Amino acid sequence: MARRIEVRAPARIDLAGGWTDVPTYCGKKSGEVVNIAINQYVRAEMVIDEDRKLSVSYTTDMPTGSGLGTSGAMNVGFITTIMSEFQDVLETAELAYQFEALLGNKGGRQDQWASALGGINHLTFKEEFVTFETITPSDKFCQWLENNLLLFNSHITHISGDLHKSVWQRFEAGDQKIVQGLDMIRDAGLLMANGVKTESKADVIDAMKLNSAGVDILGIELHEPFRDELDNLSQQNKVSAWKAMGAGGGGVVGLIVSSPQYINEVIEQLKQKGWTNIPWKIDFDGVVRQETNP
């Protein structure tokens, strides 16, 4: 009998703390990340025909190199497609991470856990271990995030492994400037977790600012593609905070508008620069697998 397995794995927004999930850092200190699974998906389909021949296909809602954890979601989708429907999602996340590491990506674990779990999560990384707390703010606060945290694709592609390489070389050499930047990013993750839990918009904004300041210490070029436009909007008091998604250097940027009245104006202004707004909603399901007999 023929079988069709369809899998949907969400991408993510890293609100704060990204970089500190990488083993080079969390092997020495704890990494602290807050991220949101969103309704931008990798979809996988595997068909096994009556002769047990396979066909496998993938589609993505967002490009690779966007900074939204596309490759992590793709590997979560791949593992979920080929494994049993009873596979534990945490085991799936770890297998997806290990598979990606074998392919040469030296990033961290947050992308795979976000895609597998869904929702808003505070993830703590220590050596090879991951613990998580799913945060469930009110519908009103979730709507504030969805409406006021805007995502834009700059259409400048990055490869996160390339961006990470020089930072981690300097970290391992004991460069205190890099240590300071990474510690600031970790502290931003902790502040963001508290902000989302307590529904403090001020803490969410301050955490995003602190995260961006830490990233600037790692390398000024990581925010360079976004800086002129978003600093200008910040000076006009239309944007309260902003940060690159993922490793930075291009791809997608997230920004929090200072008031809903500026949403359309900000979207139009950045559209004129060739950026594309990405509407999003929180995905609470995580990776989903469905098997049918066509």
Image (spheres, grey):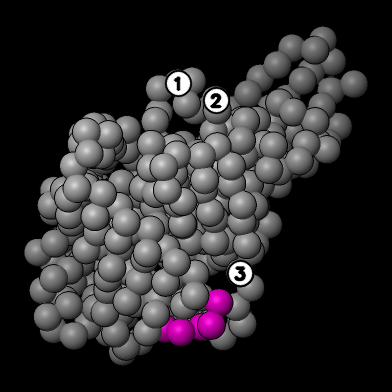
Type of amino acid at the residue the image marks with label 1: Leu
Where residue 73 appears, x then y in whole percent?
A: 53, 41
Q: Residue at x 62, y 30 (%)?
A: 95
Query: Which stretch appears magenta?
Result: 197-201
- Quarter of the image for residue 268 reads bottom left
- Residue at screen point 32% across, 56% down: 183
Look at the picture and state if 275 lies above or below 205: above
Q: Tags 1 and 2 in contact by the CB under 8 Å rule?
A: yes
| Quadrant into which the N terminus falls | top right
Provide the secondary structure element on which disc 3 rests: strand
Viewport quadrant of the C terminus: top right
| Dot 3 alpha-carbon crowd within 10 angstroms: few under 14, some 14 to 19, many 20 or more | some
Which residue is identified by label 2? Answer: 99
Mark found first going from the N terminus, 3 or 1: 1
Q: Residue at x 49, y 28 (%)?
A: 100
Q: Residue at x 84, y 23 (%)?
A: 2
The front one of 21 and 271 is 21
Task: Find disc 3 in the rendering and name its residue.
Answer: 135
**In the figure, is residue 290 to the left or right of 119?**
right
In whole angstroms, how far apart are the C-alphas of marks 1 and 2?
Answer: 7 Å
Label 2 sits on what residue type?
Answer: Phe
Circle number at residue 103: 1
Residue 230: image x %, image y %? 17, 68
Q: How crowded is mark 2: few (under 14 residues within 10 Å), some or many (20 or more)?
A: some
